[in-house]
Image (cartoon, helix red, strand yellow):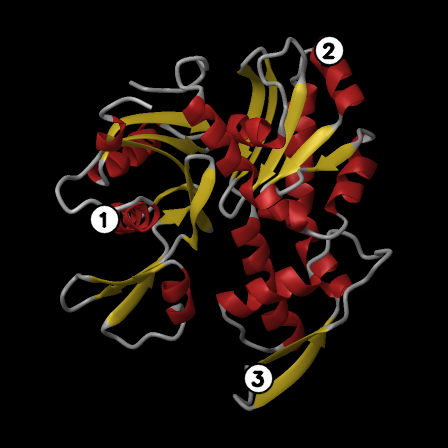
Amino acid sequence: MGLFDFLSKEIAIDLGTANTIIIENDKIVVDEPSIVAIDDSTGKLVAIGHKAQQMHGKTHESIRTIRPLRDGVIADFKAAELMMKEMIKMGTSKSRFFTPSIRMVVCIPSGSTEVEVRAVRDSSEHAGGREVYMIYEPMAAALGIGVDVEAPEGNMVVDIGGGTTEIAVISLGGIVSNRSIRIAGDDFTQDIQEYMRHQHNIKIGERTAESIKINVGSALPELDNPPADFIVRGPHQMTALPVEIPVSYQEIAHCLDKSLAKVESAILNVLERTPPELYADIYKNGIYLAGGGALLRGLDKRLMDKTDIPVHIAEDPLHAVARGTGIALKNIHRFNFLRRE
């Protein structure tokens, strides 16, 4: 501990499409949905995180709920800045006399363009970051899972988040081959909304579709421990009268099939471009799954059947990227894959 350590803060941010997680001193201090509610008449922030999520789809004309990130990148710059500022305030201890200088590591999708990287950097700096470092999501996920990223050995990580699915082969502290596709949790939610509209003639919102995904979401039409059917309530599209419909996991497996097939094909594409020596390591070590999408029932078995490679789900898939970002923060001077330009 240095004499002036209290003048500076070090935080790691997993700025996700669905959730934002902030780590300080190896502890998760903020874990909130990436959503803000703004008063349109004054432009002031009404709520962020869980409070704003509860308002989502239920607001009147003066209040607007915004998800600042879409497909893993910042879609609304002002809302992203407001959200980051407030979440950093929530997570870090306050001082009445001064604003501490913040050093932060933020993770970004591996397929980000320079413009998208610049948007994250600018938002981080406006939110109070004096030193801002970037780490690619699959690298952060690998660190969070416990993979030795600096070893001369190939490891494959698939991080299925809210906006993007990141697939990367990592060796010697670098990404050898990777692919970032914009098919992930949000697309699964949209697939469920579409399916309910076409198949059952019932209109459901994003939050209900999310609940269906969590309760009966499945990647396979046959599971060893099937979940009970989930009851969905909503207006019938033709009559506008309320209806109650039980939804089974087989139906959800059917409606998510196309999106999951795209994820499979992206994984095979990365494997095709992997050098043979590293491919042999992956065959031996298996594929690691992280992100909220890894919690989809039967996904590991489906990918195993498709690739013939063992698939391991991270111990805490939702927080793997955030924990990895926290590890990168503690080793800023050791890891040369952190971007700061």
Query: Residue 100 at what x, y percent from top left?
Result: 21, 35
Q: Are marks 3 and 1 in contact (CB under 8 Å)?
A: no
- Residue under the point 44% across and 19% down: 331
Q: Residues within 10 Å of mark 2 (few under 14, many from 20)?
A: few
Q: Are marks 3 and 2 in contact (CB under 8 Å)?
A: no
User: Quick one: SS at disc 3?
Assistant: loop
Mark with earlier residue (3, 1): 1
Query: Residue 111 at what x, y percent from top left?
Result: 46, 29
Q: Hey, what amino acid is under mark 2?
A: Pro
Q: Residues within 10 Å of mark 3 (few under 14, many from 20)?
A: some
Closer to viewer: mark 1 or mark 2: 1
User: Quick one: SS at disc 1?
Assistant: helix
Q: Is residue 72 above or below residue 156?
A: below
Q: Is residue 275 above or below residue 283?
A: above
Residue beneath disc 3: 236
Quarter of the picture holding the N terminus = top left
Query: Residue 140 at what x, y percent from top left?
Result: 51, 29
User: Quick one: SS at disc 2?
Assistant: helix
- Residue under the point 38% across and 70% down: 55
Q: For marks 3 and 1, give the CA distance.
A: 37 Å
Q: Quadrant of residue 158?
A: top right
* Residue 231 shown left or right of residue 185 in the figure: right
Q: For marks 1 and 2, give the CA distance.
A: 46 Å
* Residue 156 shown left or right of residue 106 in the figure: right
Q: Nearer the viewer, residue 191 or 338?
A: 338
- Residue under the point 49% across and 45% down: 163
Residue beneath disc 2: 276
Closer to viewer: mark 3 or mark 1: 1
Q: Nearer the viewer, residue 244 or 125?
A: 125
Q: Is residue 26 above or below residue 3?
A: below
